[in-house]
Image: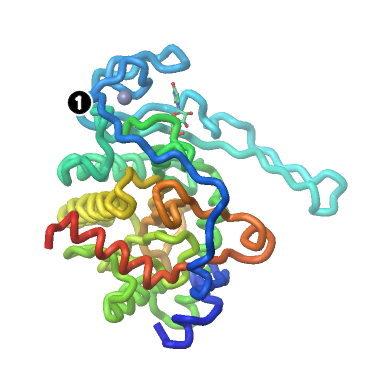
Amino acid sequence: MIPLAQQNPHRRFNPLKREWVLVSPHRTQRPWQGQTETKTAEVALTYDPTCYLCPGNVRAGGVKTDRYTSTYVFENDFAALKPDAPHFSSDEGSKGLLLAEGESGICRVICFSPRHDLTLAKMSVPEIRAVVDVWTEQYAELGARDDIQYVQIFENRGAMMGASNPHPHGQLWASRSIPDEIAAELAGQREYLAKNKTVLLCEYQKLEELLGERVVAQNASFLAVIPFWATWPFEVMVLPRRHVADLQAFTEAERSDFASILHLVTATYDQVFDTPFPYSMGLHPAPCDGEEHPEWQFHAHFYPPLLRSATIRKFMVGYELLGSPQRDITPESAAETLRQASLKVTGS
Ligand code: H2U
Ligand code: ZN
């Protein structure tokens, strides 16, 4: 990082979303007398008779969860999207101000393990590899449908991020339209390819590897970095070393290496404040809209809310809501914290 940026307020550009983030490194010492959160408790039970995701239990809608032994996928009983929703569009008053469109899709819940007490951080790499395989199958199945243009796979981990249950699980929402976050990343990557004739995130990965100061973890196929333009204090992006647009393009080795880097990142997070680290994590494969996507590079985002302890979170309020996102600790110093924490995981 250039020296002037280490001590002084500055803006950084996010080329993926074409947005700016304000960085205020001089502000990290400010006192905190505001809200604190409850520290996330470790889960001890391997089977919880009241958990709707534990094998053999009955869910809220009355359906029974199978007695599964590895991963388990089911249609979300309270799905936000329905496959048979009517497709309509309306523009009341004809001024383009009251636009609405019917939206259809499919929502599923993906259990990572039958064990209630596990998390990605505590699962073995082969167990996470089974999760990567399920994600790949789901992406292939749903992405092949004419009525699906995007398959958003994600995990909300911890009550602070809205997870409804500690049982290790994630979700997928597959939709007829391309969601806004993806549309923004698509536009950013397209613009970069058109201007530079290179793939934005491939170039970015090489640059981060060269500089090293924001690298958190790596293996033969992936690099985990705190993006230069990260908004959340300990935000992480996982980037392939090879140009791969989606999960289906992964080699066998890449699938296992992806499982391994997910394990490393989540286990590292748990070391930072000595607590199960809450986050929202999501995969960003290319849209499955029938178009070619030479601009797109597969990546995964981790958005954890914690700021300076297990109980003090970052709030996206005030200026962040009304002006632009802002952060105090720099991505470089947050990456150093994560690298130190990762030593406790790798033992080296
Ligand atoms: P989250 O923990 O990320 O909220 O995911 C759990 C999902 O599980 C949530 O979307 C669904 C909720 O709708 N669910 C069921 O499908 N069946 C149930 O019996 C309870 C919760
Ligand atoms: Zn359970």
Q: Residue at x 39, y 42 (%)?
A: 155
- State the image coordinates of residue 38 (x, y, percent, origin top left): 44, 39
**Up/down of 274 relative to 340, above or below:** above
**Up/down of 137 relative to 52, above or below:** below
- Packing grade of label 1 (10 A; few <14, some 14-19, many >=20) is few
Q: Which picture quadrant has residue 111? A: top left
**Up/down of 273 relative to 113, above or below:** below
Using the image as rendered, state which of residue 338 and residue 165 is in the foreground.
338
Quarter of the image for the N terminus: give it: bottom left
Q: Is residue 189 visible?
A: no
Colour scheme of the picture: rainbow
SS category of the residue bearing label 1 = loop
Using the image as rendered, state which of residue 236 and residue 248 is in the foreground.
236
Q: Name the quarter showing ligand 1.
A: top left
> In the image, what residue type sits under mark 1?
Thr
- State the image coordinates of residue 23 (x, y, percent, origin top left): 52, 72
Q: Residue at x 18, y 54 (%)?
A: 345
Q: Is residue 46 found left or right of 154 in the rendered image?
A: left
- State the image coordinates of residue 170 (x, y, percent, origin top left): 38, 38
In this view, the residue farthest toward the left is 348
Using the image as rendered, state which of residue 219 and residue 303 is in the foreground.
303
